[in-house]
Amino acid sequence: MRNTEIAQVFYEIADLLELQGVPFKPQAYRRAASAIEQIEVDIEQAVDEGRHRDIPGVGAAIARKIEELVATGELDYLKKLRAETPPGLVEMLSIPDVGPRTAMLLHRELGISSVDELKEAASNHRLRGLRGFGERTEEKILQGIGVLESRGGRILLGEALPVAEAYVEHLRSCLSIESISICGSLRRGRETIGDIDILVGSGDLEGVTSAFVGYPAVEKVLVSGSTKSSVEIQGGLQVDLRVVELESYGAALQYFTGSKEHNIRIRRIGVEKGLKVNEYGVFERNSDRRVAGGSEHEVYESLGLTFVSPELREDSGEIDASRSGELPELVDASDVRGDLHVHSDWSDGSDSIDAIAAAAARRHYSFIAITDHTESLTIANGLTPERLMKQVDAIRRAQESQGGGIQVLAGTEVDIKADGSLDLPSSVLKELDIVVGSVHSRMKMDSREMTDRITNAMESGLVDVVGHPTGRIIGRRDPVKLDIQRVFEVAREADVAMEINAFPDRLDLRDVHCRLAKELGVTVAIGTDSHSIRHLDYLRLGIITARRGWLSKERVLNAMNSDELKRRLHGRRP
Ligand code: DGT
Ligand code: CA
Ligand code: CA
Ligand code: ZN
């Protein structure tokens, strides 16, 4: 099990204990969960070496639970807690703004034990009699339920990806199979996914199926057939498995990657050419002779198409572009040389500048930008100009102790205030290597005001990158109202980059915005918005988003080498 999975278990235990009204223990589990999430070492390795007991907040009882989880993938204690708690109460916790305390209070005082009951009570204004509840709280809860319903059980790309990869790794090691892949929306890199799809090419149908349903995280087997199985794993996520013969592997991969709309277009092209395309292969309609199927490349080629990257398979022009040989060469993980948005423990991050620099060097980055918050973001311990100047010195020292391998850029995520002015004087901003400007307050302006606010900030000449430009949080907060076309046009004129914030619940810019940025000639900058070195992994989510937006490396700031990047950034300083 990975650190994040174990942390997730302890967070859930904390919630369940809190729902039961148990004092103190919940905080202890949360502390341990947060420490496990943040340590650099792999938890399984730590257990092997007996070092998991040294993790802050991990006492004897929690250490034993870690051992049980690592050994079996399960935890009896969690099962017991789950069995004791009404499932409706647990579900209530997924409503934004409803935590265990609120859920417990609602249960105790009003007998509410499901999301539906809560919705009914809030709609009939039965909550406002409770202490600490008012009209506003009722509205917020109803809004939260609305968000929950609209997300419709989909989970974030960034949550699903590691879960699916661990599953694939398990199957690969159980069976020493080579032909195995994630398919469906997850392979296409959609920002949320409905279920995980896995395809295996193998003659050993039984072996594959039993390894699949035998995976430790499986909670319920929904279907177990010889070529098709489905399970539900911890957290309620469904995983579908298909097993096909090797000669059909490419055709099946193409078919199960979808999208459905893309596949409909593919089959139609087949019909035009007298070919039948299905999950078993490409066949001549008259003779049933197989012309392709072993690899995806073959399948596209047999239809007179160049290979279409999975991220583009949404029936949004990729088939025509493929037919005429005009698909872009998409930016690739190997093009991206660093991260342009990282928080340290100088503001609300949890790691030191040195730890961040070292982690970036281990990843062989050419550069990493430290971009902490500024003063007006008091909840995030934002930096005053004085502290920022001290931080610049600390960054320069970290740079020196890293040697020549990596450039540690001294930056800021400066708050863009309501009038578009910046939360730092220009004399300070000019000293920095990179300035990310972001909106964090007064998000509810009308479109004209918000557009002026952001374009004013860009036209100051002091901002290099606009951070999380639309402010949306997937499933929780709508994007700000914004004339994005206008913002992009100003960005191009002012030579300001738009961020692809790669934090899993942001992905902002999102795919369609990236495509517009490409059309309008706007540069993008990928930043993870990491608040811990564990979050540096999110860079790939930003790359996937860029690819879904048809972007090539020419438009991506992170694809420059550190000298080019510094030259470009410093060249912009007035
Ligand atoms: P999701 O799970 O809702 O995020 O979206 P997908 O795209 O992963 O959809 P899913 O899991 O229902 O099916 C996986 C792939 O299988 C889908 O992308 C294309 C293929 N597929 C499934 N059902 C059909 C179908 O009825 N017709 C065609 N052409 N393809 C299908
Ligand atoms: Ca799926
Ligand atoms: Ca599926
Ligand atoms: Zn921010």
Image: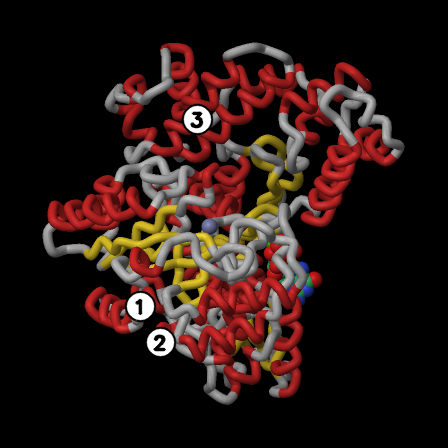
Of the image marks 3 and 1, the number of the one nearer the N terminus: 3
Disc 3 Cβ-to-ligand 4 distance below 8 Å? no
Q: Amino acid at mark 3?
A: Ala
Picture coordinates of residue 459, whole percent (x, y): 44, 71
Residue nearest the observer in this picture, 242 or 538: 538
Picture coordinates of residue 7, whole percent (x, y): 45, 29
Q: In the rendered view, does 559 fall on the left or right side of 74?
A: left
The secondary element bearing badge 1 is classed as: helix
Residue linked to disc 2: 554
Quarter of the image with the N terminus in it: top left
Mark 3 Cα within 10 Å, few/some/many (few <14, many 20+)? many
Mark 2 Cα within 10 Å, few/some/many (few <14, many 20+)? some
* Residue 288 appears in the figure: yes
The secondary element bearing badge 2 is classed as: helix
Residue 152 sits above or below residue 122 on the image: below
Residue linked to disc 3: 33
Q: Are marks 2 and 1 in contact (CB under 8 Å)?
A: yes
Residue nearest the observer in this picture, 246 or 140: 140
Residue at image coords 54%, 37%: 213
Name the residue at the right extreme.
Answer: 124
Residue at image coords 61%, 65%: 482
Q: Amino acid at mark 1?
A: Ala
Disc 2 Cβ-to-ligand 4 distance below 8 Å? no
Query: Within the displayed image, which quadrant is ligand 1 positioned in?
Result: bottom right
Residue linked to disc 1: 559
Residue nearest the observer in this picture, 103 or 301: 103
Question: Which of the 4 quarters of the picture holds residue 110?
Answer: top right
Residue at image coords 43%, 42%: 166
Mark 1 Cα within 10 Å, few/some/many (few <14, many 20+)? many
Q: Which mark is drawn over residue 219?
A: none
